[in-house]
Amino acid sequence: MKPTTARDGGPVTPEAQHLHLSRRTLLRHLAATGFSGAALATLPLVGRAAVSAQQPKPGGDLRWALDMEPDTLDPHVSSSRYDYQFEKEIFDSLVVRDAKGNVVPHLAEKWESNATGTEWTFTLKQGVKFQDGTPFNAAAAKFSFDRIVNPATKSEQAVFNLGPYDHTEVLDDHTIKIVLKSTFAPLLIGLAEYTMGMVSPTAVQKYGQDFGRHPVGTGPFAFKEWVAKDHITLVKNPNYDWAPSIFTHNGPPYLDSVTGRFISESETAYAALQTGLVDVLQTVPDIHVSEVKSSNQFALLSTTVQGFPPSLLFNCQKAPTDDPMVRQALMHAIDRNAIIEAVYDGSQLPAQGIWGESSPFFWPGSTGLYPLDPKKAASLLDGAGWVKNGSQRAKNGQPMSLVYLTLPGQIQGIAEYVQAQFKEMGIKLDILVEDNPAQQQDAQKGVQHIVWLNWLLADPYGLDTVFGSENIGTGWNFAHYKNPTVDELLKEGVQTLDQAKRIQIYQQVQKQVLTDAACFPINYRTRNWGLAKKVHGFTVGPDGEWAHLYDVWLS
Amino acid sequence: MQVEQPLVAPVALAEPGLARSRSQAAIVWGSFRRNRGALIGGAILLALILLALLAPWIAPYDPLQPAILQRLQPPSPNHLFGTDQFGRDTFSRVLYGGRTSLWLGLVAVGLSVAIGGFLGLLAGYYRGAVDLVVSRVVDLMLAMPRILLALVIVFTLGTGVTNVMIAVGISGVPDYARLIRSSTLAAREHVYVEAARVIGVPNWRIMARHILPNVVAPLIVVGTLGLGAAILSAAGLSFLGLGAQPPVIEWGLMLSDGRSMLSVAWWLTAFPGLAIMLAVLAVNLLGDGLRDALDPRLRAR
Amino acid sequence: MLRYVQLRLLTAIPTIVGLSLLVFLMVHLLPGNAVDVMLTQQGATAQQLQQLKAQLGLDDPLWVQYARFAKDALRGDLGRSLFSHQPVLSQILAQFPATLELTLAGMAIALLAGVTLGVLAAVKQNSWLDSFSMVASLIGVAMPSFWLGLLLIYLLGMKFPVFPVAGTAGWRSLVLPAVTLGFNSMGIIARLTRSSMLEVLRQEYVVTARAKGLGEAVVMLQHALRNAVLPVVTMVGLQFGYLLGGAVIIETVFARQGVGQLVVTAIQQRDGPLVQGTVLFLAVIFVLANLMVDLSYAALDPRIRYQ
């Protein structure tokens, strides 16, 4: 019943990519130096949205610090996100997703399916070669797909993207037909995954079991070396000529090489960025985020990571939070930004709704739904009968007392903060700290009024687990939320294949859930990248987790 | 000597030894008192032990209670040693940590002494095959860097305070085994031991009455110095994440936790580390003092 | 001399064999179903578990497993890591040079600083220099290496960025770790050198040399030091094991490459074959190093050879 938190990967949801730096630094510099071409040229420009007065320069080695070492570089076997970062540069898939999450052509130029969605015909791009010279063609594509489903490969993630795969037919040198045993709507999205990279049959035959240490694909960067526990080096693929439309240029990448160093200790990694040992830091420690934000030498790139935003769920079946007016009042009393500042050192991006602005599922109504407004909160509470009697609010002689259930650790800080804020409103909040599984069990029982929830939601269909009424007491419906309209919508959403319809459905769900005040999102899980001034064109994919190195250049 | 009174004879034989050790104690104490280092060491150690024992009463805060909004505060009158990333008071944690770290060291050394001493006693007394086996095993254990031995034992048993005690304890066995063995070998040669055996005094009694008193002195010295090494080893293992586990508070573990905040919160690593150093320093000074006080007496016999 | 060498080599072999048995037993005597836990962490089902165990030969009697392990080890095959599936020996050999570099550097610092301090303390006995060096060695012995390492990182890596905070690249990244590693041994060597030097200085031949009118420096270096250093050489052998073990912690503190951090990671990940291989390797290195020290000691002091 508990939804599987995908270890990594799984279908990717587009998320917002916020360019903290370009807006802020731009404004600051404009204010300080006046608008001039020279000022613009000195800005550490990051991302496509920023205006660049400089032209991309080829050459250079990009060095960056990663938290962990990959397990393998064989995409068909991989299941760790640390593998994907390199695999996406070494390998290409048939299709790829753009910033909005739509599937666009890559190694496949066009495709069509039959009416039942059991046969998919792909026309492959011509003139594509693997890094070892082997031509990429229909036979090679078939080789890759068959390899994925072959039990000997022991695929841990890729195989799920093919679903009820039956076989592939080679129609001609550049056309293949994938035949499925039954309808599988997510096939196209699945094919865009980094685990679905096309591998060189020659190399697989040559290296066999060790292919993961000697990967060969068609991607913009070729594998050079992997020194265990130290670094992985990729070099430019000079023949690369088939970049998908999501990038700003075609042809070989600007960078000569990329060296990824594995530094798991956070202070060490941060020092590596500071001292110039690396140019990119994958995760800036929370305590240093503000330093990097305000630094002249470095730029901060904040991206949101896929998933249900860490939120507070309000118990809709336990008094006094069973009264929607009370819930709404409480939400107006919580200062999101202050919590992020106090608990996360301001390193997280505040959430508005369940999905952020750049996601197709974003519901515009979620912005500014419950702004911090203590006066409004007070009047709502008064209206609901909870009147302040001295310093405590009470109704019918009962003082207002709530229970907040939390896991231990950093997030306890949220409970503390809310406790302090509610105290000012005259509400007594008791904090109950429990570890799993006790915490989960109690939340399912509903001993609390407020509980914090966070998980890797791959696709909106998982909302069912959090807001579907049949999951009260057994799933993650800690809000004990029961709304027949929402239940209907959620059922519909799982069965609908039409993306536009799905968007509509889930926006409706959000509208219901948020106006019913069952859920108060606090922040989007944010990944903070630290970039040296000389790094340009560094972007992060819609998943918020992995960087695109193809357009990167160094000044 | 009357054969019919075996119970009396050994006592009578041991009498000179016991008498000697009684006056010895007085001489040792006198010499010890004059050794400044030993006194300082002893005083510091006593203070640390007292602080650790009284921690539940002197600690100003609950060492496990987080206060996220108060986190990463530098030392202040409110928080003598500052707070950590969860807002917990470092001073209270150092006090409680002492309970774990000192106790860990003590039990580990105790284990080393008990097991090593026992093995050494057997090897030195019985000699022959027993000695051969014990010596080979001890040599084998010595053929490996000590921390490696402890690490492998932790791998086998798992992490946690008890297992660290066992691991550090066992890795310290060779030192005491050798020491007791050579002391036993020497003590064994004494006339009254031979005599006791001739009479038919049971071996264990001989070992307890005649051998042990002679090995106690070097044992105390080496044991005291070994306590320092044991504390360091246990803290080291915890630092690596292979020893005490949260929520247990231990000085080495505190160092490991504080490391990820090193550049913004130096106090998280400074104070627990200082505590470890003080404890080991105190123990070493004490041990040195004991050695100076005891050894000349032994050599003079 | 040759006979002595042969003798010592001969005794080293049973030690190594014994060690391999010891390490093997400790790794395989995992309590209860710990092996199962280790394998299930890889995500194996009950059936796969049975298959895997048969494949890895884990359901054979222990002595059969040991024989297989020993046989493979002699051929240079120490198995494959449970996690990375890479051969254990090649992983170790790739990491070893960094550890060797660190250990030797630490030893060098310990010797140089220790001997210098000890000699100075002995020569200027009871002066402030004497007290200072004695206090320094006391602190050196009592200070936890991982604490010293963190202090140095903070002071000389972060506050005043003189040295790199971590990593294995370049000679500069060797300085702080080597100093940290050698600090403890330095304390011990200083004290030993001091007492040994004091002994030697009282000897007759020193008095004689002085009486002959030889310059103080000559007396020191040629006569006194050479003899005072002998016990230190033995100590070096003992210290090498300590330093090798210390490298385990230092490599973790400074995020350096090396066999030490390999062992720690292997234990954290419960990677049996890797733990077995690395511990055995380090132990063998230790035995060989001790052997070399013994041999060099015998070369220096003829009396040893004829024991």
Image (cartoon, rainbow, N blue to C red):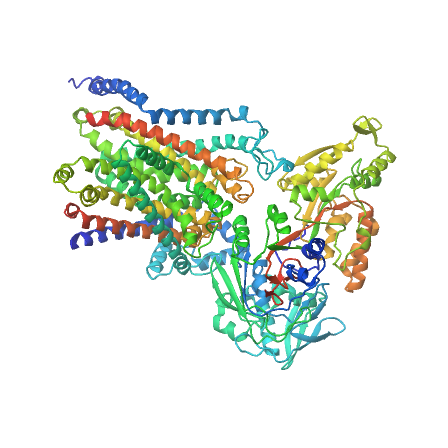
Residue positioned most to the right:
A383
Please indicate whether residue A248 sits to the left or right of residue C290 in the image: right
Depicted A377 relative to depicted A550: above or below: above
Depicted A437 relative to depicted A429: above or below: below
Q: Quadrant of residue A394?
A: top right
Q: Say whether residue A293 is visible.
A: yes
Depicted A401 relative to depicted C94: above or below: above
Q: Quadrant of residue B119?
A: top left
Please indicate whether residue C133 sits to the left or right of residue C83 in the image: left
Please indicate whether residue A113 sits to the left or right of residue C189 in the image: right
Percent across and percent down for residue A133 are 53, 78
Q: Quadrant of residue B18?
A: top left
Percent across and percent down for residue B248 are 52, 36
Query: In this orientation, which residue lies closer to the viewer: C160 or C228?
Result: C160
Query: In this orientation, which residue lies closer to the viewer: C37 or B240?
Result: B240
Percent across and percent down for residue C90 are 40, 61
Residue positioned most to the bottom:
A172
Query: In this orientation, which residue lies closer to the viewer: A177 or C155?
Result: C155
Identify the image quadrant of the C terminus of chain C: top left
Q: How many marks?
A: 0
Q: Say whether residue A305 is visible.
A: no
Percent across and percent down for residue A345 are 65, 44
